[in-house]
Image (tube, helix red, strand yellow):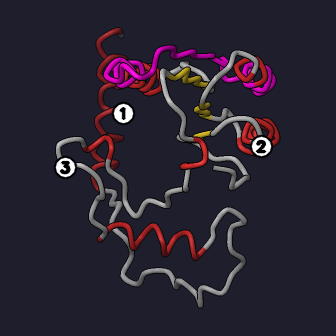
Amino acid sequence: MKISRTFAVFAVAGTLLAAAGCASDAPGETPPSKGAGTGEQSKFFVQADYDREIALRNASPQGPSDKPWEQALDPQLADTTKYKKAGPYHLCFSNAGVGNPWRQVGIKNMQAEVALHPEIKTFTVADAESKDDKQISDINDLLGKGCDALIVSPNTTATLTPAVEQACAKVPVIVFDRGVNTKCP
């Protein structure tokens, strides 16, 4: 009895595998119609942004060829000469968090780059632990520590925008990795 049950289970399994092998993922003879393309667009899709990004595929990087990390495609630089002052500098960084390997490597790279610049005497880092309210508090705290410039990697866009704008009124702010809804340099 045990042998016949085992045989039956294997027979059914074999039949199912054979039937599955006969199936096909290939598309049918006629592909489905794509339509006129006039349907409602996603609220996140902006044609001008898409076109600009597609054009970057053919752009050549600007910056030193021996330092690709300093290169950019079609950079939109801000005039920061009004902030120029003699060093040494106190550079502050409000980081959204280090909760994944990519962000952990990012902070290590930033620390290594700072070490290459003796004009940066102090580098203060605040980790927001991926919490908006903590990052807003961190930015306010950093501004009270005499930062000469503030780097911000915002945890979210809309929530961090007011804090970044307030910081821009006091020190030069560099926003990277994620954006905010402001144009302040």
Q: Residues within 10 Å of mark 1 (few under 14, many from 20)?
A: few
Q: Residues within 10 Å of mark 3 (few under 14, many from 20)?
A: few
Does residue 23 appear to the left or right of 97 in the view shown?
Answer: left
Q: Residue at x 43, y 59 (%)?
A: 75
Callout 1 amino acid:
Val
Dot placed on the residue nearer the N-terminal end, 1 or 3:
1
Q: CA distance from mark 2 to mark 1?
A: 67 Å
Q: Residue at x 69, y 47 (%)?
A: 180
Q: Residue at x 63, y 16 (%)?
A: 126
* Residue 8 vs residue 90, the one in the foreground: 90
Q: Which residue is mark 2?
A: 165
Residue 2 spot, x, y in % from top left: 34, 9
Callout 2 amino acid:
Glu
Q: CA distance from mark 1 to mark 3?
A: 63 Å
Asked which quadrant contains residue 102, the reply is top left
Q: Which residue is mark 1?
A: 12
Q: Are marks 1 and 3 in contact (CB under 8 Å)?
A: no
Callout 3 amino acid:
Ser
Query: Which contiguous range is marked in magenta?
Result: 111-139
Does residue 21 appear to the left or right of 166 in the view shown?
Answer: left
Which quadrant of the figure contains the N terminus?
A: top left
Which residue lies most toward the left here? 66
User: In the rendering, which numbered label is found on residue 65?
Assistant: 3
Residue 139 spot, x, y in % from top left: 73, 25
SS state under label 1:
helix
Dot in front, 2 or 1: 2
